[in-house]
Structure formats: C-alpha cells, structure tokens
Amino acid sequence: MKPATIVLAAMVLMVGMPAIAQTPAEDLARCERYYATYERYSNTGGESRQGSVASALEARTAVEDCRRGNTQAGLAVLERRLRSLGYKL
C-alpha cells in the first residue's frame, strides 16, 4: 500500500469514530458526581464504612484537584475509591 493510501484510510476510520475526549467542564462535572456518590455511600454515622479516614481525605483531595483543573488525576482517584466500594464504572 502507498503511504498516501494508508493516511487516507486512517483518516476515514477516525472520522467514523466517536469522540472520546470530554471537555474540562464535563470532566469536572463527572468529578463532582463521583465525589458526591463517594460521600453519600462511604459514610455511615460520620464514620467511613471502610474505616479509613485516609480514604476520605484522598477523595476530598481528588475533587479539589479536579476543581483546580487537574481532572485526569482527580478522576483516577475517585474512580478507584468508588470501585473499592463495589461500584462498576
């Protein structure tokens, strides 16, 4: 195959693919939803169900990272915390 044909084929494939990347606002909204879910389901009577203050602090730090624009790092932590509670994301 000629290089131009390969490039053209790649471009055709990319046009048909859905956009995976989200905007920063969408990522921040997802962070906020994940954090709210974590807060709601990880606490019982003021104590973490997992018995870990460190986990709660890690989640709080993650949402703050998101609010400062570092959504990729924040989302990774929040997803890990939710999975530790048994959530499928």
Image (spheres, grey):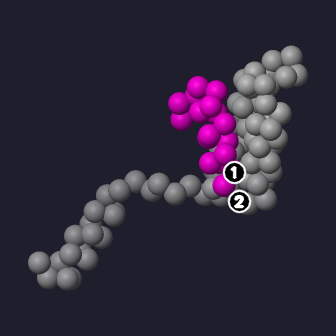
**The furthest residue to the left:** 1
> Could you tell me the amino acid type at mark 1?
Gly
Mark number displayed over residue 70: 2
Query: Where is residue 49 shown, x and y percent of the image?
Result: 75, 21
Counting labels gives: 2
Looking at the magenta stretch, what is its main secondary structure? helix
- Residue that mark 1 sits on: 74
Tell me which amino acid carries mark 2: Asn
Q: Which quadrant would residue 8 be assigned to in this image? A: bottom left
- Asked if the residues shown at circle 2 and circle 1 are in contact, with their CB atoms under 8 angstroms apart, the answer is yes
The answer to whether residue 32 is seen in the rendering is yes
Expressed as whole percent of the image width and height from the top left, the position of residue 40 reads: 76, 25
Q: Quadrant of the C terminus?
A: top right
- Please tell me whether mark 1 sits on a helix, a strand or a loop: helix
Q: Residue furthest bottom?
A: 3
Estimate how packed mark 2 is, as few (under 14), some (14 to 19) or many (20 or more) residues with alpha carbons within 10 Å.
some
Range of magenta residues: 73-89
User: Where the N terminus falls, by quadrant?
Assistant: bottom left
At x 79% / y 31%, what residue is drawn? 52
Image point (64%, 27%), residue name: 85
For this rendering, which residue is in front, 16 or 49? 49
Residue situated in front as seen by the camera: 29 or 70: 70
Q: Is residue 88 magenta?
A: yes
Residue 53 drawn in magenta: no
